[in-house]
Image: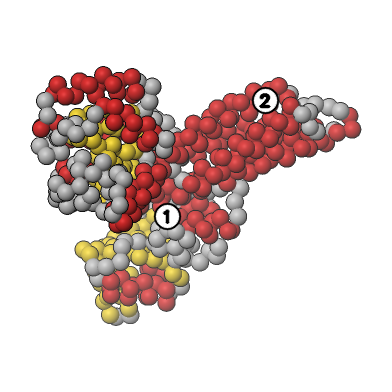
Amino acid sequence: MDNKTIVALATPQGVGAIGVIRLSGTEAVQITAKIFRGKNLEKQKSHTVHYGHVVDGEKVIDEVMVALFRAPKSFTTEDVVEISCHGSPFIAEQIIQLLIQNGARSAKPGEFTLRAFINGRIDLSQAEAVADLIASDSAASLDLALKQMRGGFSNDIKILRTELVNFASLIELELDFGEEDVEFADRKKLIELIDAIQSKLKPLIESFKLGNVIKNGVNTVIAGKPNAGKSTLLNALLNEERAIVSEIPGTTRDTIEEVLNINGIQFRFIDTAGIRITEDVIEKLGVAKTMEKLKQSSVYIYLFDVNSTTPEELVKEIHELELLGFSGIIVGNKIDKASWKATAPFYAVLNSQLATRNLQLLFISSQTQYNIPLLKEKLFQLATSNLQPDSTVVTNARHYEALLKANEALNEVMVGIENQNTGDLVALDIKRALEYLGQISGEVTNEEILGTIFSKFCIGK
């Protein structure tokens, strides 16, 4: 990475009320001062804002506000300037070209955040959290990104890594005194340390499933027999007529997908074709797609008609679905057309079935909206049941993979100690674990990893 001052539009492309142009580098203030008519920017203090005009010689380009952030008290730790101009793409481009003509160069995707990382302002996991923060589309994903950007996950990893580094150094010391058969690293204490580290790694690894769900949305499949009211339920959840509703069984031939935000969590509802044996070629394809979507779901709603389903039939259907291994809510629909006495047999039969499983039973009426708010609440509880207020949740696939590999390396350390391997072999496995943990925070990295991560950022961030 060169040290030349970089410039980019920090606000989205297109017409708006204002546009913000950002510069970062040792010459950011001087370059801006060359095209600014107002106060002498080079003499102004950090964290101040100044009114003036951007000019090209004697020609006024725009009326602007210029904010100064002097090193090291800026996002990149370099001198940073932000020019707020009117939101015309033509004006913004004119100003950027003037800045380039006076010594700046166009920033690459994510280069401002990359400089913040390289200059020690943030670590790599925090840098990735910046991208997640920008892409967040729900309160929950925003909260996770903010926690990670503030260093919660990084701190957990650094503590684990520091403890392991101490033992690695002792084993390295043993190698220096190999001929004297000296043991500096107590193997029993090393086993205890690895047990402690793995006990902390395990919940982080397991949290990825939840973190991925919160970050990308909860895939929620609505399944059931034809005419159970799946499309009506989807419309009731969305509070709009999204799916075609008909009394004719098999109306839904393909999947219909819609997104709904429940208490800050994005749920991706998928209305599927009814599950039944059919000779209709198109409907067969729809049923096959339903089963495929069920396998991809995090949560499913199994809908049945309380008026046309027996408890015994329902138990059999649930058993078949449970082979997929996902959490679900069993929902009896059309309760408005049945007596509440009709629900008693379902409770009696299913209570024994549900007691030891992650399933719930609820009766609703999609037509009258009865218990729809309660269904939404149960879906939210099911999706976030493992989320603790202050717990660290892994949302990044790269971090998840590194944690898995670090845990595998620690397993190898344990096997090596049990087999009384020499110190050099044990040290090798410890180094592997340290490397994988270091990859998360960026303490161990390479140009290829950095290029892949920051190429996904928008230009100007």
- The foreground one among 353 and 107 is 353
- Rendering coords of residue 309 (x, y %): 22, 32
Residue identified by numbered label 2: 191
Tell which circle, 1 or 2, labels the residue nearer the N-terminal end: 1
- The foreground one among 364 and 461 is 364
- Rendering coords of residue 161 (x, y %): 60, 36
- Rendering coords of residue 167 (x, y %): 69, 31
In the depicted structure, whether residue 300 falls above or below residue 36 = above
Q: From this viewpoint, which residue is outermost toward the front? A: 279
Residue at (13%, 37%) from the top-left corner? 369
- The foreground one among 175 and 229 is 229
Say whether residue 38 is visible: no
Q: Residues within 10 Å of mark 1 (few under 14, many from 20)?
A: many
Q: Secondary structure at mark 2?
A: helix
Q: Quadrant of the C terminus?
A: bottom left
Type of amino acid under label 1: Arg
